[in-house]
Amino acid sequence: MADVGTLLKNRLPLAAALLFPLCAIAATSSSVDDELSAVLNRAGFTGTVGSSIERRLGRPVDPRLANLRRLLWFDTSGGLHNDNSCGGCHSPANGFGDSQSIAIGVQNNNRVGPNRSGPRNQRRAPMAANTAFYPKVMWNGRFSAPSGDPFDNSQGYLFTAPEGSSAFPPFDPFVSHLLVAQAHIPPTELVEVAGFTGTAGTIGPEFDQFDDGLGETVPLPDASGFRNEPIRQAVLARLNSTPAYLALFGEIFPEVAAGAPIDFTMFGRAIAEFEFTLIFADAPIDRFARGDREAMTVQQKEGALVFFGQGRCSSCHAVAGRSNEMFSDFEMHVIGVPQIAPAFGAGSGNMIFDGPGRDEDFGLEQVTGNPAGRYKFRTSPIRNAALQPAFFHNGAFTRLEDAVWHHLDVYESAKNYDPVRAGVDRDLTRHLGPIEPVLDRIDPILATPIDLNAREFNALVAFVRDGLLDHRADKQSLCGLVPATVPSGFQTMRFEECPQRTRAATPRP
Ligand code: HEC
Ligand code: HEC
């Protein structure tokens, strides 16, 4: 009879050696799960914000606006020179964000994608997806809901001059959401859609003023001081002279059917309604938080733990309260982003940048006039960041890894920044604004380097790239929204990264 003792002696270590790693993995992965669940609980993250839109609006998203809102997004007739629309900068191939490091608005080559060309503005267009949940919009937060809740206009909405806080008064039932108010703005932005009258040649020689086409010379864009209302009226005149739009608006607004003109509030409501459908907040992290432990890979989970832990990311990319689980505190911080700037007037840029060399972006200071706000930008809500072709307010980095790494040692990253290595387009590689004054103001949270080993870093990147991505925002889904034709009859822009066939397949109005 075999000696049981010998058997055990011989086999047990082997069995143990075989079994132990499996147990260890099982134990680790379930302890990672438990730990992450606890962390998310503590952070106030539920993974349910995406499904809350209609409850927060207090009504269903309006299906009658379904087609209209989409058509307006892509119709260049909203621009005084018929050469740009929301879709030109907020592309369906990029989660309705920019295809560029710095947006190209008017005088473009009618393409949207890597080969878009034309004079640049000052910043990258953020993704319009999920903006319904932002209490503060724009890189410098210049439009906001003082209540902290974009769905609550009980305190009105705060805008910069000339709109100020009076243009969208509290309780105006037609301006029921921050985005309804905000949609009044882009058509008046000269460099976005309105255009300078005729050509860039009308910009004054000192680059400080230009002819607004309304018989007057006015200071350059910086919306303050610019008369927005006449531009809005001109855009409305176009909509009101397009029978297809009168019919479409008439289906929704009885007053238009009865002969009243389309007004800007209707335009704003339609645009905002489209944005209410662009909610893509069901990522692996959300499904995990709702109890599906298989929704994330082990690497993403480890990355999430770094994000909420030693990486310090969630101290700014917050999820609780008014963050609406958008991974932003919606506060302004200096994080030392290299100042890339196109050369103004040399065919590259059409905005005057800040600073003595006109190669800086003062961020929040532009809004408050207070130098304490210099170089401060809103913490980016980073859901679906994987869809962006470039990162930060000026797209200074084109690889997500580099953008994440920048936070870990801001000084090292900023001082060694090379635009060519960072992969930005050639016209943006020629000149950098000063970095020292920016680094002098770094946010205390990032003033000391964050020490991560390679495994932790890779996990963090995997979490930000894949753990926060809702695949409904992929170009495969969103390109289907590009209409084959638009009511004005104008040519639609060419979306380089959208397969042609999905365009033709779009149902007609
Ligand atoms: C020329 C390109 C351009 C066009 C055209 C354009 N935008 Fe934008 N959009 C931008 C840029 C750039 C920003 C950020 C500007 C800033 O912060 O200074 C922005 C910001 C936004 C934001 C705020 C997003 C956030 O994260 O805060 C929304 C919403 C938005 N645009 C909607 C629209 C709509 C609706 C239209 C059409 C009516 C439109 N945009 C047309 C470039 C454009
Ligand atoms: C001190 C606050 C702060 C901390 C801490 C912080 N961030 Fe950021 N983050 C920001 C701000 C502000 C921006 C936008 C800066 C800009 O564009 O000028 C940003 C931008 C980003 C972007 C680019 C998004 C876009 O819109 O292009 C990513 C990705 C990102 N952060 C990830 C992280 C990760 C990962 C961590 C942790 C290692 C982290 N952040 C820590 C404030 C912070």
Image (tube, rainbow, N blue to C red):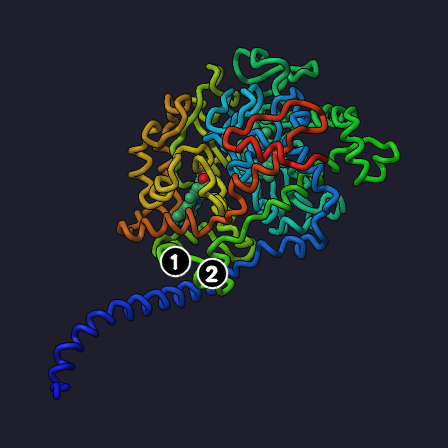
**Percent position (x, y) of residue 266?**
75, 37
Question: Please, is residue 308 above or below residue 170 in the view?
Answer: below
Q: Quadrant of residue 17?
A: bottom left
**Percent position (x, y) of residue 162?**
66, 31
Q: Residue at x 65, y 21 (%)?
A: 82
Quarter for ligand 1? top right
Q: Residue at x 67, y 57 (%)?
A: 55
**Percent position (x, y) of residue 332?**
48, 43
Report the side of 400 relative to 502 (left or right): left
Q: Is residue 369 visible?
A: no
Q: Is residue 264 visible?
A: yes
Q: Residue at x 34, y 52 (%)?
A: 459
Whether the residues at callouts 2 and 1 have beta carbons within 8 Å, the answer is: yes
Does mark 1's beta carbon lie closer than 8 Å to ligand 2? no
Question: Please, is residue 18 above or below residue 371 in the view?
Answer: below
**Percent position (x, y) of residue 52?**
62, 56
Mark 2 or mark 1, earlier in chain:
2
Secondary structure beneath disc 2? Answer: helix
Q: How many marks?
A: 2
Question: Please, is residue 261 above or below residue 372 in the view?
Answer: above
Report the side of 238 relative to 388 (left or right): right
Report the side of 103 relative to 406 (left or right): right
Report the side of 143 relative to 421 (left or right): right
Circle 1: residue type: Lys
Circle 1 packing at 10 Å, graded few (<14), some (14-19), many (20+), is many
C-alpha distance separating marks 2 and 1? 9 Å
| Residue hosting label 1 | 301
Specify the farthest residue to the front: 1
Q: Quadrant of the N terminus?
A: bottom left
Circle 2: residue type: Phe
User: Of the numbered discs in the image, which one, if any, rests on residue 288?
Assistant: 2
Circle 2 packing at 10 Å, graded few (<14), some (14-19), many (20+), is many
